[in-house]
Image: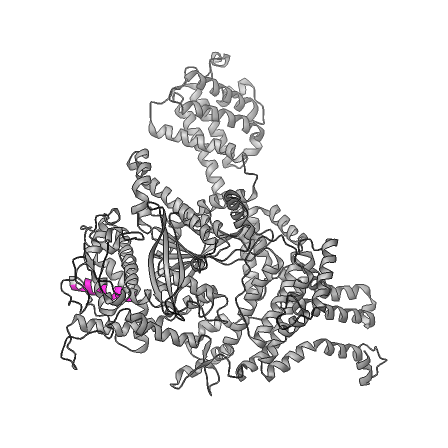
Amino acid sequence: MPRRYCPGSKSGRTRTTLLEDEPYNIILVHNLLADHPSLCFPEVQAVASTLRAVRDLRLPPHGQWHLAIDLLDWLAIFFCFQHENFKNQREHLVLHLANSQMRLSPLPENIDTLDAGVLRTFCQKLLKNYTNWCFYLGKKSNVWISKSGHSNSDHSRELLYVGLYLLIWGESANLWFMPECICYIFHHMTMELNKILEDYIDENTGQPVMPSLSRENTFLHCVVKPIYETVKAEAAIILAWGEKGYPWQALTSNDVRVKSQRSHDRRWSAEAGKRVVFFLLVPCVYVLPELLALALFVLPWGLREGLVDNIKYTLFWALGLWHKISKNEYRHCAMIEAYDSIKHIMLEILNARSEEHSVFAVLFHEIDHSIEIEKFTKTFKMTSLPQIHLKLIQLVEILTKPKKDASQVVYILQALYEIAVRDFFKDQRTIEQLREDGLAPRDPAAMAGLLFEKAVKLPDPNEKFYRQVRRLHTILTSRDSMQNIPVNLEARWRITFFSNSLFMNIPHAPQVEKMMAFSVLTLYYKEEDDEIWTTKLRDLKLWASYRGQTLFQIVRGMMYYYRALKMLAFLDSASKMDIRERIRELGSVGEDVSLDGFNSKVYMGLKRTKKDPHAEEILYLMKHNEALQVSYVDKVSVRRDEKEYYSVLVKYDKQLQKEMEIYRVQLPGPLKLGEGKPENQNHAIIFTRGDAIQTIDMNQDNYFDEALKMRNLLEEYKHYYGMRKPTILGVREHIFTSSVSSLACHPDVFKRFWFLTRGGISKVSRVVNISEDIFAGFNCTLRGGNVSHHEYIQVGKGRDVGLNQILMFEAKVASGNGELYLALSGVEIVALVSNNNNNKALSAILNQQFIIQLGIFTTLPMKVENSLEHGFLQAIWDFLTVQLQLSSVFYTFSMGTCTHLFGWTVLHGGAKYRGTSRGFVVQHKSFAENYRLYARSNFIKAIEFGLILTIYGSHSPVAKDTFVYIAMTISSWFLVLSWIMAPFVFNPSGFDWLKTVDDFNEFMNWIWYHGGVFAKAEQSWEQWWYEEQDHLRTIGLWGKILEIVLDLWFFFFQHRMVYQLGIAANSTSLYVYLLS
């Protein structure tokens, strides 16, 4: 029984392991010498052979040395990494290098040897951020590799460097978000590695240099955990700027200290307070164009570029639409191909010396001439084309049969000739005129029923000719299938988009074995529709889950990638072997030994520890989707008050018919220190494979037809966009809930190793990084990445469809923007004042022009896009439908909510992630609940604003003219009514009388219920009021003053109205104001 040292095992002892029976992920990398199908690929053997080149390395000071040991074993023993970590990273490294070598073109002469260029390219790609870090700090890189890099020692050293980086990264837990910290750790560990490789002698002991780490799991406990504990203790921190004007200026001094986000009395800093004053002026600039756009009954897109840029943009779309309508290139090409094929085939089946051949040649000449002088429709009757079309289909069907009946061909040719000379021409001609024009035979006997009888001469079996006949048959009969258009509008849209996308500028797709490998990562969010999970039968569960925004739907969608790649792989080789044999091969071996073309990861949370019944449903998904793997965080109690946390990867083993745990990597502590979602994403990334990773939310879907184009999309990484290749590929989203919602985010595809070394695919700081995916784009751009967007591929997207759900999402975005505003307070001033050329790009971003825009200019591109995709009439109808669905009311209401929450966050902080659950919106929400949500943001302000408008209409001289008053206040009244009525209009059964009575009774009970100490805001108005005012305990003096000013805005308006409208006969007495 082979023995193997396992770093991280209890007491540092060896353990006996049945290596062949040990569970594995994709390939059996824990025993590269085993006889296993996954190790039969020559590329895998080449990498494994290079990894086993350990003969020239110093023996480790502890652990057992055996034949199966490789370079990663050697690193793990010397630097005390976890056994599960280096097992995971070994497969990671082997898979990537093997796939990279497989994609080489042409293949190397010796495929059993790892190509030096593959290894060198990966080393440079993985360590690029470390190289930049050393350059920025003026440090000499500790990666010692000769420029030629042709020796075997260089290959081993490169593998050691990339292996060390992957081992550090794979065990760094929350340090993933601090790539410079990982660079620092890697810098010092490579220094020790180089001393070991170069046989340095320790001056203190006189012995060969040994690494600083010597005990089991030392890297986790002595390197990662101390930094983790510091981050955990200061989870919400910013750099204190001391005496400096702005925080980034303090970065140049050496006495910068880390302080909590707010001072000990929980007040905002003085600088942030100054910026809050400026914030009060900003809403005025934003509100004016919105109100003007509402007066025009259009939906503005907000403040974008300048007016000139918008006019240019509008003209671009308008001209594009006109060009699209007037120049349908693809239809034109199809018509030319059909006509040329008909002419060629008709003349080919007739004897070239016969009169019938010359008759058809003249007929085609007249058609060509009429097209050339653009008088085709004036010369020929279009009503005859269906008859000609039917006869042509009959002709090509006869020609495609194995046994061709010449008499039937003669009969159809005679029918076509009769239609052509008697019905097709608008100007009727006599027999004499036809003979004179060459459109009838000179021999009268031919016109007596023997026409074409002796002229037909079918070609000999000619593959080229009959291939053209089959092609013509496809063109002529395609209209018949188009008549069977699906009734379902969603199916129509998908077919239309897929067919149109094939004519877009799309990269050439390589064979499946040559494509870039990728993974799909999605997060599991607990659904709240419990009756679907627990009270229905399995089939009904699936039926309902596939029609909601659930985990079942997203897994089904992502598994289309797997099905698409299997089909494409079959098609790649179908012409080389018998189809049946290939199908049997795919069913027996192909699925098990394939490399990492596709992997899907789903974050399962803590379901395993809570014994949640949903875990059984996730197990069902793994059982029926072999490419699906689940990563979750496991919490284990080891002592009375001590717990350990592990990142775990599991999959379903079909042979053993059970769930198998593949990897279990220990974490330094609880995973969630900041915002939970990005931490969950990055925790699962260590188990992903491939060159790219696509992030999918729980409310997204995918389609098989779109999955076929994933190979094309991944090829975009090889093309330059501007001066750089892309690092994020943005793709289109098809909002399948667009009839009731239009909010959307982007299912980006990330260049995996680029983000792996630069802080992950999302940012995590609590409060600041509420919209974590936006900060991923910021991080990408600021670190020199490039973002491109591609319209030829799409994924499905569902959004919140209930009023409360949508506004919860809007609240998250608005409060996140408020925190971002505070975090960047003053950046624009310093950036614009500075003469440093490095600020030009930032200046361009921040140079937003606050001008009033007419909504018509900014909404025209949207209308043009709908016209291109659905047709002009359908676009007009969609626009009218949206207005009839009161979208303007909803938009106005959400604008008030967002403005309130943005201002609230700027004044008081407290931004947080808000889960919306995205359940089925069929439940009526009580008025008490809606009042708690929208009282301060909409209801109270609308009532006050409406009262002001009423008083203004009663006493203003301008209001005496009804038309003038309506013209001046219609948009304001629209705002008032929208803010009051929207929660009723968009609430299921909002105007039902019985539910209205129940809402009133519940609301009154909520108002008068006092409760006690343990009463919740949902039960008592008093408790809700205390919670609403709770922020006053933590804000500073400026915050309280601004709160009072904003709450008293109605009284300031009232003061102006009492004294300016002459209500009190021009009296200026204070008593008049108080009485009013």
**What's the residue at 74%, 66% (across, down)?**
969
How many discs appear? 0
Find residue 609 and report its horizontal and vertical position in percent: 43, 60
Q: Nearer the viewer, residue 379 or 243?
A: 243
Quadrant of residue 309 in the image? Answer: bottom right
Q: Nearer the viewer, residue 49 or 9?
A: 9
Task: Determine the residue located farthest toward the right in the rendered image.
Answer: 1065
Find residue 427 and report its horizontal and vertical position in percent: 58, 26
Q: Nearer the viewer, residue 261 or 440?
A: 261
Find residue 451 and report its horizontal and vertical position in percent: 46, 16
Q: Which residues are magenta?
A: 153-165
User: Is residue 351 placed above or below 840 in the rendered structure?
Assistant: above
Q: Is residue 228 left or right of residue 918?
A: left
Find residue 944 and report its horizontal and vertical position in percent: 73, 71
On whether residue 498 falls in the magenta region, the answer is no
Q: Is residue 670 left or right of residue 913?
A: left
Q: Is residue 995 visible?
A: yes
User: Is residue 1002 placed above or below 652 in the rendered structure?
Assistant: below
What secondary structure characterizes most of the magenta part? helix
**What's the residue at 40%, 75% (across, down)?**
231
